[in-house]
Amino acid sequence: MSRKTPLHRWHLAHNAKMADFGGYEMPLWYSSVKQEHLSVLTSAGLFDTSHMAVVLVSGPGAEELLQHCFTQDLNACIGRPKKPLTAGRCVYGAFLTEDGGVSDDAIVYLLQQDRYMVVVNAGMGDKIAAHLKKRKAARAADIEDLTDQVGKIDLQGPGSGSILRRLLPDPDSVLAGMVYFSFKGSLDQAAGKEDRLQLVDGTPVLLSRTGYTGEFGFEIFLPPDRTAAVWETLLEAGQAHGAIPCGLAARDSLRAGALLPLSHQDIGPWPFIRHPWEFALPFAADRSGFTKDFVGRLALETANDAPHTHPFVGDDLRKVSASEPAVVVDADGNEMGVVLTCATDVGIGWQGGRILSVASPDAPENFRPRGLSCGFVKVASRLTPGDVVNLRDSRRVVRATIATDVRPDRTARRPVESMIQAPEEVSS
């Protein structure tokens, strides 16, 4: 039987199309995947992400344990030149097996000294907790799986900051200087008063400048019993900004256009290297090697025959199935590899030989894109951006171009101050 999030009843009451995802019964969409996708690009969308799992790692040996198990070097992962992870910052990386394959990807938050929050995918809390415990050795670290003990709501899109302001008692103070991959607040009972953050209704939250859409927004961690009330308050506050509830289908198409991987699909049991996310590996500045030892390091250093993962973009919105799986073929029909993800980003289109988004500031006034297929392929030999391949399943052949990027003018990294807009500006 599938697990249910604190918002399950709300989804059913609002006619969501439900399906199993990661062992949870989750909303795929409400009325229109296209409308939900476009809402995040032009206004705001609200996602139930309480299926994600949280693991707490604490104690004097917590940092050493994570340094051993996590791909990012916590002593050199923030900024350029790279600096250590500090309290109030978080970083993306992965947990690997000894053979270099991915157990799961994750975001690690430094709550305070010797205390970390690790956010992993649905159904992976117990597995990553076990992964850490197995490699704990003599390290003084406590590992606590908080699966289903934390609610989570993602507020994504250009109107997110303006909406969130209405729920914060001192929004200017809270939001000021919140850079990408920073956070404020804590659900941790061990947190000091100065680290706590509450909404105007008294709900304690951890507010993170992160997301899985490529667009400006926030992830909100909160107690499960407060999730439904805060969800409804956010929707009410977002009415003037065009905010709507969104399902996992729009989340998938948005993340594909933003070049974000889906764990156990775009990254998996093959070596975690030769892909667009090598920023999650602890390469030295000159790429002469890794800056630390970690589980899977030797396997990556000797993975001479590892496959290559590349982003692609199609000529139009047509896509192939990634579940057959679809194959990648060259002009002569020779199979080169497989399609990992193929989705349609409905907010983009070709214009004058380049891709524009509905949110591109230089898009023509009459620009109405139908969308473009995009995703990732895994091939045996390296391809070059601009190379043209064919994607083939049992129904069709789709022409695609290997790319370095897909959806332009994404807003995820923009300063908070530049994204706070009046309601009429957001909804126009």
Image (spheres, grey):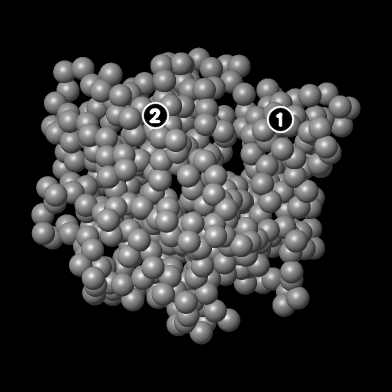
Residue 324: numbered disc: 1
Q: In this orientation, does residue 321 appear? A: yes
User: Which residue lies most toward the right here?
Assistant: 332
Identify which residue is drawn at 87% across, 32% down: 331
- Where residue 301 appears, as percent x and y from the top left, is 47, 18
Nearest-to-viewer mark from 2 and 1:
1
Identify which residue is drawn at 74% across, 71% down: 367
The vertical placement of 388 against 244, above or below, is: above
The vertical placement of 131 against 83, above or below, is: above
User: Which residue lies most toward the bottom here?
Assistant: 424
Q: Earlier in the sequence, mark 2 or mark 1?
A: 2
Compared across the picture, whether 348 is left or right of 151 comes to: right
- Where residue 269 appears, as percent x and y from the top left, is 52, 22
Image quarter of the N terminus: top left
Q: Which residue is mark 2?
A: 95
Q: Quadrant of residue 103?
A: top left
**Three-letter code, disc 1:** Glu
Image quarter of the C terminus: bottom right
**Three-letter code, disc 2:** Phe
Compared across the picture, whether 195 is left or right of 256 comes to: left
Cα separation, mark 2 vs mark 1, equals 27 Å
Contact between labelled residues 1 and 2, with CB atoms less than 8 Å apart: no
Identify which residue is drawn at 50% across, 35% down: 263
- Where residue 262 appears, as percent x and y from the top left, is 53, 39
- Where residue 295 appears, as percent x and y from the top left, is 36, 21
How many numbered callouts? 2
